[in-house]
Amino acid sequence: PLCLGWALGLAAASAPPNLLLLLMDDMGWGDLGAFGEPSKETPNLDQMASEGMLFLDFYTANPLCSPSRAALLTGRLPVRNGFYTTNAHARNAYTPQDIVGGIPDSELLLPELLKKAGYVNKIIGKWHLGHRPQFHPLRHGFDEWFGSPNCHFGPFDNRALPNIPVYRDWEMIGRYYEDFKIDLKTGEANLTQIYLQEALDFISKQQASQQPFFLYWAIDATHAPVYASKHFLGTSQRGLYGDAVREIDDSIGKILKHLQKLGISENTFVFFTSDNGAALISAPKQGGSNGRFLCGKQTTFEGGMREPAIAWWPGHIPAGGVSHQLGNVMDLFTTSLSLAGLQPPSDRQIDGIDLLPAILQGKLIDRPIFYYRGNEMMAARVGLYKAHYWTWSNSWEEYSKGIDFCPGQNVSGVTTHTQEEHTTLPLLFHLGRDPGEKYPLSFASDEYQRAMEQISVVVQQHKATMVPGEPQLNVCDKAVMNWSPPGCEKLGKCLKPPKSDPKKCFWPH
Amino acid sequence: PLCLGWALGLAAASAPPNLLLLLMDDMGWGDLGAFGEPSKETPNLDQMASEGMLFLDFYTANPLCSPSRAALLTGRLPVRNGFYTTNAHARNAYTPQDIVGGIPDSELLLPELLKKAGYVNKIIGKWHLGHRPQFHPLRHGFDEWFGSPNCHFGPFDNRALPNIPVYRDWEMIGRYYEDFKIDLKTGEANLTQIYLQEALDFISKQQASQQPFFLYWAIDATHAPVYASKHFLGTSQRGLYGDAVREIDDSIGKILKHLQKLGISENTFVFFTSDNGAALISAPKQGGSNGRFLCGKQTTFEGGMREPAIAWWPGHIPAGGVSHQLGNVMDLFTTSLSLAGLQPPSDRQIDGIDLLPAILQGKLIDRPIFYYRGNEMMAARVGLYKAHYWTWSNSWEEYSKGIDFCPGQNVSGVTTHTQEEHTTLPLLFHLGRDPGEKYPLSFASDEYQRAMEQISVVVQQHKATMVPGEPQLNVCDKAVMNWSPPGCEKLGKCLKPPKSDPKKCFWPH
């Protein structure tokens, strides 16, 4: 395929641009002022949007964190790269501390490929692609790491269960809650400030070194337990969650200004998005908003998978752009390669597309969006139509415990608590007239017939050529938790693992 | 009270500004790109917002058209100005063709008062304050009228029931569906183009005359049956409703450009808002969106009463402003008077406040919002807290017929189908954390206690001083319909009214 990054007039002689990926955790489509959040508290992100391009139809590859991040870094659907489970039908799975699997060596990650073009790659924040030694990000293309391998649930007592470690490069330097405090009563933690400083320092260092960089800023302040530093506590209309968003907004403003101050903003491609929809189960105090979309994280409704997204690259991306290009986090893989002047791997199916024609030339590329839960394709979007082949919010058992992924929302026959199969007669929505997936089209209508004819072809082709990877998220074992990460000896922070007892992981959703 | 329009530095020698009120019909908070509509198809309104001030917490005085418009033009709650019913508890009422009542002579309307400052006043579009001769807008301060007295339901067969007339000034010049066509199959009608031309012509004429004007542009294309002219049909992602919005957006762009071309934009205060929330009952094909807010038109949830609102006045209002001032359509009465250098009437309670300190100086004025249905105060907002004293979406009887004001939304104990009294222990929401009114605060929490103490004082004071006006919307009679409006003889369009048979109007909601 044509290498668009260069074809689009980036001078072949000049160095490829730096790549800065700002990946939010559980932030929803509706959390930014630019996307209609009613308290409009994100002036820096709103300005980023007004100076760059707003994507209104941008998706994640999975409504849960680990598979989404694996898809982003491999350009492939989780069902291909192994970040899924077959333990039960249509279940979301991720990488808790007791997960045995992780990113397979056979997968080619974006930083691995970028090295060929001379990039220095750093991940700041959450890795989430497996925490055992063979899955370490520095084994998969990153040169530097500051952050954690898993979600910051907890605190555990650090005896029965370990708190997650914070790594600097190969070794741990402490643990969340112990060395990197989060006050669960007040929500105070200065971690976003630390992650911000890491980013600023790395950017300064790289600018001095003249090597292009890829910085993956994968912070976690908006994932429950949500936190903000003292300066931001109580400053939002939206409570603690809003405080966290305001601190992130402020930090991103500082990062962009830093690029400008260093004179490299025109040579740094910045993309902002999130890993999945807002966790409505934690809202309103610990979770965000998916705007008018249906349900949230864990579901294949729009609220679970449509993401806020902004591209920023002064001097290249026209200011104030708005794109309806159907985009996906997997496109960041292909687009980044294109910007680096690299080809995507040709020995495997890549699901991400190069968005540069959409970003730089305002083109609209026809491509579908697939919505998966585990290895089940639950839904597909083609153009403005979305067909649900399976619907499920969560089980009655979970729901009866108060686990609700669609609080205040109930669309009869759509937000179901049993898995409903619609493969012979999919539930069809027109996302232009009905972005909230509230009004299924009549099966008898001409519009239904016309739309389904088109979608069926796309779905059949997708399924016919689908070769699932080896599922990595089937087996859990307490013995593999972060008991004794590398470096724990120096800190006196090693814990004794229990005896190995591998089991099928239980994935309730 | 201080006359703020002049006090804020408008030179006393210069003429007061023109006033242009763009009032939408059933348009919702979530229908504009600037407010987060996902297809972002309102470039002109979005630009108006970026050049002016966006109000994010702006309300109507009633979730239904007639009372809302009566409140706007009188600066008073419908329960004061008579635009309510006592036929049953907590019912919305309006002015269908068989309504006997209308705006009482004792009410002082904005155009009546503006005349004292030399304004020429025109209404283009829907009047809706009573269609019998004594209620005619030219008897209540307007100098010119082009439009209709009622909603454009229909078509009726024009024998058993008349179509609504279109007036030019004192006389009818035709009827909707007959002389002013709406093709109910395709949705085609060129009425917005006609209303646009009327506005442009009036503005040109007034500019030449050097007299200040008040233009009330109350168009109806977004009220079901929704319509758009041929050029706009099929151009929106959102279907016919979106086509209508796009045509309105285009028209408003043309009006603002016209002001600029005539060199009077800096001397014309423009305000854009809507009469009530989007009619979700008609969505998605004939109704709009209230974004993330709960329910729609007819209800006292945020979706029924929070409105899109933009103030525009180049050279006076700082560009790109965002205000969290709690505003209300009634404030347009008081604010307009202030701009004209007039005092509001002192012989009656005025509910509207002067928004100029908020608009010109970015101040936040502490004031409550009351949510009424009929003569029942259903809810009150103070700061970010909203207390529901009564909740009701609609009756089981209506709901079972498919009338749903909250499609896809169901908040247990909140969106109820029986009228639920909460006067001793109001349902409390924090609209910052929870704009969607999904998570009532715990009655036992300190936060609940603190907030309710504050709200109770405000509500008690409001109720203690409330003197309801004579209800105007209790009696209906087919004989008063628009059978033979003035001017019908010349057109041969008089119809014979039936015998008078006044009855209590039936208000189901």
Image (cartoon, coloured by chain):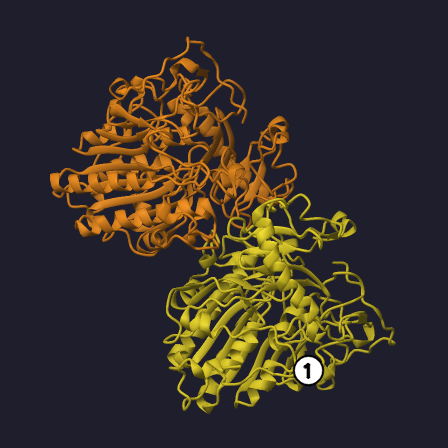
Chain colours: A yellow, B orange
- On the image, the x and y values in percent for residue A34 come to 45, 59
Please state which of residues A195 and A203 is positioned toward the viewer in this rendering: A203
- On the image, the x and y values in percent for residue B409 come to 60, 42
- Left or right of A142? Residue B228 is left
Q: Amino acid at mark 1?
A: His
Work out whether A203 lies above or below B318: below
Are there few (<14), some (14-19), or many (20+) residues within 10 Å of tag 1? many
Please state which of residues A368 and B449 is positioned toward the viewer in this rendering: A368
Work out whether B39 lies above or below A104: above
Specify the quadrant of the image occupied by residue A137: bottom right
- Left or right of A241? Residue B146 is left
- On the image, the x and y values in percent for residue B285 come to 50, 43
Specify the quadrant of the image occupied by residue A222: bottom right
Position of the C terminus of chain A, as image quadrant, is bottom right
- Left or right of A240? Residue B207 is left
Residue A228 in sight from this viewpoint: yes
User: Residue under circle 1?
Assistant: A136
Residue A492 in sight from this viewpoint: no
Per the image, label 1 sits on a secondary structure element best described as loop
Chain at tag 1: A
